[in-house]
Image (tube, rainbow, N blue to C red):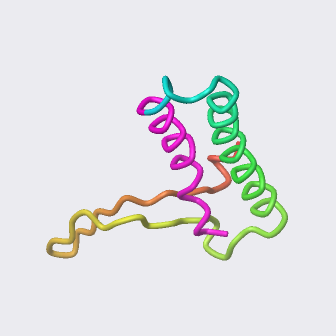
Amino acid sequence: MNNLLALIPALPLAGFLVLSLAGRRLPKTIIAWIGAGTISAAAIIAITMGIQFLQAPPVDKAYTQTLWQWLNVAGLSVSFTLRIDALSLA
């Protein structure tokens, strides 16, 4: 389930990019389906992850997914990580 964490911000971003680049060439019904569909899919994933988190919390008390490591110098490691924990669900 952790690998779906990146889809929560990625789906609305993909919908925005499709609509901003090709929105004028698409029919209005397709525009509506893309706009509402990407937001709805991201919401369903977030709700599903939240329910799963509340039913069986992970051992380290959070779901994390590291997307990339930006910097690693002399013991300092800076990475771009998405995280769902109890505070973010509140």
Q: Give the dominant element type of the magenta stretch: helix, strand or loop.
A: helix
Going 50% across and 66% down the picture, which residue do you hit? Answer: 65
Residue 63, image x, y percentages: 61, 65
Query: Is 66 covered by the magenta stretch?
Result: no
Q: Identify the image quadrant of the C terminus.
A: top right
Q: Identify the image quadrant of the N terminus.
A: bottom right
Instruction: Pick out the residue farthest to the left.
Output: 74
Q: Nearer the viewer, residue 23 or 84?
A: 23
Instruction: Pick out the residue farthest to the right.
Output: 55
Please state the total of marks drawn on the protein image. 0
Above-or-below relation of 15 to 7: above
Q: Position of 34 compared to 6: left or right?
A: right
| Numbered range of the magenta stretch | 1-21
Residue 80, image x, y percentages: 37, 58
Q: Position of 20 compared to 1: left or right?
A: left
Above-or-below relation of 12 to 25: below
Displayed quadrant of residue 39: top right
Query: Is 6 covered by the magenta stretch?
Result: yes
Q: Position of 72 compared to 49: left or right?
A: left
Q: Nearer the viewer, residue 12 or 87?
A: 12
Q: Position of 5 compared to 53: left or right?
A: left
Going 41% across and 33% down the picture, which residue do you hit? Answer: 21
Residue 37, image x, y percentages: 69, 40
Going 71% across and 44% down the picture, which residue do you hit? Answer: 43
Going 50% across and 28% down the picture, which residue do you hit? Answer: 25
Q: Nearer the viewer, residue 73 or 46?
A: 46
